[in-house]
Image (cartoon, rainbow, N blue to C red):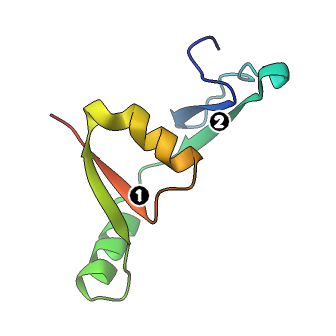
Amino acid sequence: MGAVADPGQLTESHRGLVGHGQLSQDPARGVRSASLWVRSDGAQLTELVAKVDAGKLRVHVAAHRPVAELAAVHEDAGTGRLSGKTVVLAP
């Protein structure tokens, strides 16, 4: 928990159906946690891509920023300065 800024959020993502127990939290510091369960669904992804291509689904991307600026992206999100999604670019 020491790597999470005050107040902050620790999110752990899982694939599959096996649980990993409760994540640590530190209410005194305002640090909370959440588990996010994901499953791959190629058919659903194909459907979403088709909707984007057909103009039926739009995603507002506010910025493209390098992974080196990830801390600043989190800061901007926490202060409400992001007007849409931010795409983080890997090197």
- In the image, 44: left or right of 15? left
Is the N terminus in the top left, top right, bottom left or bottom right quadrant? top right
- In the image, 66: left or right of 62? left
**Which residue type does callout 2 highlight?**
Ser
| Residue 40 percent location from the top left of the image | 41, 50
Residue at numbered disc 1: 41
Residue 83 vertical position relative to residue 13 in the rendered view, above or below:
below
| Residue 39 percent location from the top left of the image | 48, 48
Outermost residue, left direction? 91
| Residue 59 percent location from the top left of the image | 38, 72
Label ID, residue 35 = 2
- The quarter of the picture where residue 28 lies is top right
| Residue 23 percent location from the top left of the image | 71, 22
**Which residue type does callout 1 highlight?**
Asp
Mark-to-mark CA distance, 1 and 2: 19 Å
Q: Residues within 10 Å of mark 2 (few under 14, many from 20)?
A: some
Residue 15 vertical position relative to residue 1 in the rendered view, above or below:
below
Is the C terminus in the top left, top right, bottom left or bottom right quadrant? top left
Outermost residue, right direction? 28
